[in-house]
């Protein structure tokens, strides 16, 4: 098994909807989805609901999964962890190392 085939917290935690949005940098892409506890709950919800959704004609561009937390309810510590997860996912999943670098540069300017 190659290293990229081994599961990590970043490549098993996103439902197909958010993984697609991450790769395409499409909205919605809330920072709160990078919380690993939320990712576990979202994946469980997705696995239970997937068979029902596959049988119906559900709009694939509309998120109908496990509700994600509001960005305004994050503490600074939670925001920092979620931001680090976003940075890592940009590199590991979306393969956008240059954009990830710009993200860190922007954060440094804001800090």
Image (spheres, helix red, strand yellow):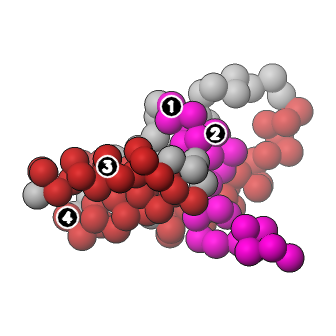
What residue is pinned by disc 4? 76
Give the structural element (helix, strand or loop) at label 1. Answer: loop
The reply to whether the magenta stretch includes residue 12 is yes
What residue is pinned by disc 3? 103
Separation of residues labelled 3 and 2 (CA atoms): 19 Å
Numbered range of the magenta stretch: 1-26
Q: Nearer the viewer, mark 2 or mark 4?
A: 2
Marker count (numbered):
4
State yes or no: discs 3 and 2 in contact (Cβ < 8 Å).
no
Coordinates of residue 7 in the picture (x, y in percent): 71, 72
State yes or no: discs 4 and 3 in contact (Cβ < 8 Å).
no
Q: Is residue 75 left or right of residue 65?
A: left
State yes or no: discs 1 and 4 in contact (Cβ < 8 Å).
no
What residue is pinned by disc 2? 20
Q: Is residue 83 left or right of residue 38?
A: left
Q: Nearer the viewer, mark 3 or mark 2?
A: 3
**Label 2 or label 4, whichever comes before in sequence order:** 2
Q: Confirm whether residue 108 shows in the render.
A: yes
Separation of residues labelled 1 and 4 (CA atoms): 25 Å
Give the structural element (helix, strand or loop) at label 2. Answer: helix
Coordinates of residue 96 in the picture (x, y in percent): 51, 47
Q: Main secondary structure of the magenta part?
A: helix
């Amino acid at each position: 098994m190659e290293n990229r085939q081994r599961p990590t917290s970043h490549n098993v935690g996103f439902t197909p909807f958010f993984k697609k949005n991450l790769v395409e940098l499409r909205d919605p892409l809330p920072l709160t989805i990078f919380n690993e506890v939320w990712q576990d709950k979202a994946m469980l919800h997705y696995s239970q609901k997937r068979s029902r959704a596959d049988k119906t004609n559900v709009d694939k561009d509309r998120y109908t999964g496990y509700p994600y937390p509001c960005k305004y309810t994050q503490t600074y510590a939670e925001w920092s962890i979620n931001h680090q997860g976003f940075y890592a996912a940009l590199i590991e999943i979306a393969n956008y190392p240059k954009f990830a670098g710009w993200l860190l540069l922007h954060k440094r300017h804001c800090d």
